[in-house]
Image (cartoon, rainbow, N blue to C red):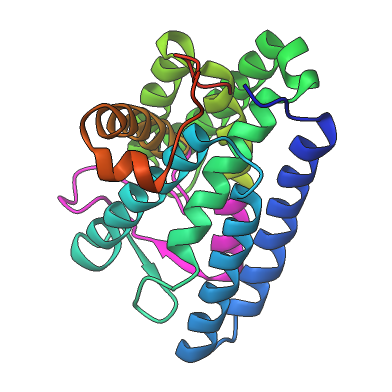
């Protein structure tokens, strides 16, 4: 199993934060073609970071990005959960999901996070719970949908296979969502598509989406690795690959 240095894990997280700040700020006034260019840069950026990862992590990030992209087209243009500035799904968003997922993995495998794993998870639950309570009962725009998402997030953290990854995803996603909506890159609708439950901008428990992405990515990659020779050839594993993915 490849050993990851503390410097690499920290570098991935810091670069992701810089990418979020720079890319979303640039997109604020970008044209459609400029968005395409930003998407190409993001793909190259993600590919460079994945070059230093294990085949297992590369597979997971690839599947996570594909699954999240499908979710984007269902949630935004089709169902109207939220709307991007140009009424599209910007080209930088699909590879951006891969970056966010990879950053959550890197943050969770860092020595500091491993040493304080219980504290990190407890802090994520406490912060997310306070946000959900504020959104549902105090905010001028009720966010009951966010409360339900937070309940799902809490279930993943308390009973899921990788609670530290989910907790780290919460902090990364909170930064991404609060910053992106503040800039107007995307705007969440006042209610979910049925009009029954109010939603915040952003919903408080949106990190639950990355928990689902992780759950799907791991299961799909395991099935493909076992059943598809072409997949194994494209993403070869070491001769003595460990059964469990290092996170």
Relative to 218, is 5 on the left or the right? right
* 204, 31: nearer the viewer: 31
221 up-or-down from 155: above or below: below
Residue 203 in magenta?
A: yes
Direction from residue 161 to residue 54 in the image, left or right? right
Residue 221: name its quadrant. top left
**Closer-to-camera residue (60/75):** 60
Residue 206 in sight here? no
Q: Residue at x 38, y 22 (%)?
A: 151
**Residue at image coords 50%, 37%:** 55
> What is the x, y in percent for residue 98?
50, 50
Q: Which residues are magenta?
A: 176-204
Count of numbered circles on the image: 0
Residue 161 sits in which quadrant? top left
Residue at 48% x, 60% y is: 95
Residue 117 appears anywhere in the view: yes
For the stretch drawn in magenta, the main secondary structure is loop
Image: 3 above or below 100: above
Residue farthest toward the right in the current orientation of the protein: 7
């Amino acid at each position: 199993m490849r050993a990851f240095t503390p410097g690499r894990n920290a570098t991935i997280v810091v670069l992701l934060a810089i990418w979020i700040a720079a890319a979303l700020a640039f997109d604020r006034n970008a044209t459609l073609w400029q968005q395409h260019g930003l998407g190409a840069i993001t793909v190259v950026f993600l590919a460079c970071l994945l070059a230093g990862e294990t085949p297992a992590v590369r597979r997971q990030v690839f599947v996570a990005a594909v699954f999240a992209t499908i979710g984007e087209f269902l949630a935004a243009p089709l169902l109207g959960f939220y709307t991007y500035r140009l009424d599209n799904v910007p080209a930088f968003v699909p590879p951006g999901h891969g970056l966010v997922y990879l950053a959550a993995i890197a943050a969770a495998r860092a020595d500091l996070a491993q040493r304080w794993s219980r504290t990190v998870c407890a802090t994520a639950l406490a912060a997310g719970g306070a946000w959900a309570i504020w959104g549902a009962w105090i905010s001028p725009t009720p966010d009951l949908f966010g409360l339900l998402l937070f309940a799902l997030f809490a279930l993943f953290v308390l009973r899921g296979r990788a609670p530290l990854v989910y907790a780290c995803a919460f902090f990364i996603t909170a930064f991404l969502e609060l910053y992106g909506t503040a800039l107007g890159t995307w705007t969440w609708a006042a209610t979910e598509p049925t009009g029954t439950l109010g939603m915040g901008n952003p919903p408080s428990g949106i990190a639950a989406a990355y928990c689902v992405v992780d759950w799907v990515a791991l299961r799909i990659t395991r099935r493909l690795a076992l059943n598809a020779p072409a997949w194994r050839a494209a993403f070869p594993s070491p001769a003595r690959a460990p059964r469990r993915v290092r996170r």
